[in-house]
Image (spheres, coloured by chain):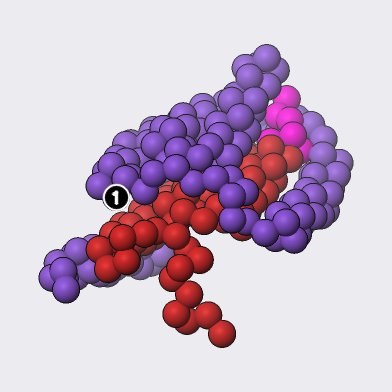
Chain colours: A red, B purple
């Protein structure tokens, strides 16, 4: 028996924790880690539904999500390092040049 | 699926995710994120997706986490209060939004309950069935992902090469 509802509920809880992290943390690095939490919650839902439907498509999509997460982490961390070189801070509140 | 294993994995995943979000030291947050990724990989094993679990460990807990730890060590951003300069209104709005999100999703998905699940064919979640699907039905997204990774690599190299001015 697969407790599919409970797995999806855990996935929702993990996603919400990621949203909370993005909203209340000021360090750009921790905001990035929270984004990884959200991507992983989505992956968990993909794999759980893949098992429930006995089809491999969900796992293939989880694979693509991982590829996107790798690209996002590489570029994002390079941007954070570039910002830190200029401003000696990774505080997201201080990088508000584009804020309306 | 073993119920005790399932609940222990769920507890580990939620606790490590909470530590990532709430701990003020970024190094602890990064290590906790690595533990979280391993617990997600364990979920994948429980959901009969062994190959996805392996690439989760190698790609996420290996490559991406090492990148994160490198940057944390490089920048040494120090501690940051969890609500040091977060305004009260911002904090309450965040908690309200998170509560609304959970209240919207969790009852619905819990209503799905336990499904017997279709019996999986042998080799389900293994390398062979995974690769067969990836290189037939999903060939175009696969190539698009490779172009995305190439673009990300060029972008990261360009950003990292800039002179300090």
Question: What span is colored magenta in the figure?
Answer: A1-7
Q: Position of residue B116 (x, y in %)?
A: 75, 30
Q: Position of residue A7 (x, y in %)?
A: 69, 36
Quadrant in the rendering for residue A13 = top right
Question: From the image, which quarter does the C terminus of chain B lie in?
Answer: bottom left
Q: Is residue A97 left or right of residue A52?
A: left
Of residue B44 and residue A33, the one placed in the foreground of this image is A33
Q: Is residue A50 visible?
A: no
Q: Position of residue B53 (x, y in %)?
A: 44, 33
Q: Residue at x 44, y 33 (%)?
A: B28
Please state the chain letter of the residue tagged with numbered disc 1 in the rendered image.
Answer: B
In the rendered structure, does residue A10 fall within the stretch colored magenta?
no
Q: Is residue B158 left or right of residue A90?
A: left
Quadrant in the rendering for residue B73 = top left
Q: Is residue B105 left or right of residue B57?
A: right
Of residue B118 and residue B18, the one placed in the foreground of this image is B18
Of residue B43 and residue B96, the one placed in the foreground of this image is B96
Question: From the image, which quarter does the N terminus of chain B lie in?
Answer: top right
**Label 1: which secondary element:** helix
Q: Residue at x 32, y 41 (%)?
A: B69
Residue assigned mark 1: B75
Mark 1 neighbour density, 10 Å: few (under 14) some (14–19) many (20 or more):
some
How many numbered marks does the figure carry? Answer: 1
């Amino acid at each position: 028996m697969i407790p599919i509802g409970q797995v999806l509920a855990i996935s929702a809880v993990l996603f919400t924790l990621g949203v909370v992290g993005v909203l209340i943390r000021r360090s750009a690095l921790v905001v990035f880690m929270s984004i990884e939490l959200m991507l992983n919650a989505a992956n968990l839902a993909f794999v759980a539904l893949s098992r429930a439907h006995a089809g491999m498509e969900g796992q293939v999509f989880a694979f693509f999500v991982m590829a996107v997460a790798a690209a996002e982490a590489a570029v994002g961390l390079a941007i954070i390092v570039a910002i830190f070189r200029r401003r000696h801070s990774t505080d997201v509140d201080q990088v508000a040049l584009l804020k309306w | 699926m073993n119920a005790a294993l399932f609940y222990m994995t769920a507890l580990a995943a939620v606790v490590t995710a909470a530590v990532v979000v709430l701990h003020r030291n970024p190094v602890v947050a990064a290590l906790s994120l690595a533990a979280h990724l391993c617990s997600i990989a364990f979920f994948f094993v429980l959901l009969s997706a062994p190959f996805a679990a392996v690439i989760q460990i190698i790609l996420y807990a290996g490559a991406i986490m090492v990148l994160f730890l490198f940057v944390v060590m490089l920048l040494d951003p120090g501690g940051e209060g969890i609500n040091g300069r977060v305004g009260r209104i911002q904090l309450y709005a965040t908690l309200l939004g998170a509560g609304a999100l959970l209240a919207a999703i969790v009852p619905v998905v819990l209503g799905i309950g336990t499904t017997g699940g279709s019996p999986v064919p042998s080799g389900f979640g293994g390398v062979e069935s995974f690769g067969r699907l990836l290189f037939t039905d999903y060939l175009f997204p696969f190539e698009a992902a490779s172009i995305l990774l190439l673009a990300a690599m060029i972008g990261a190299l360009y950003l990292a090469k800039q002179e300090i001015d």
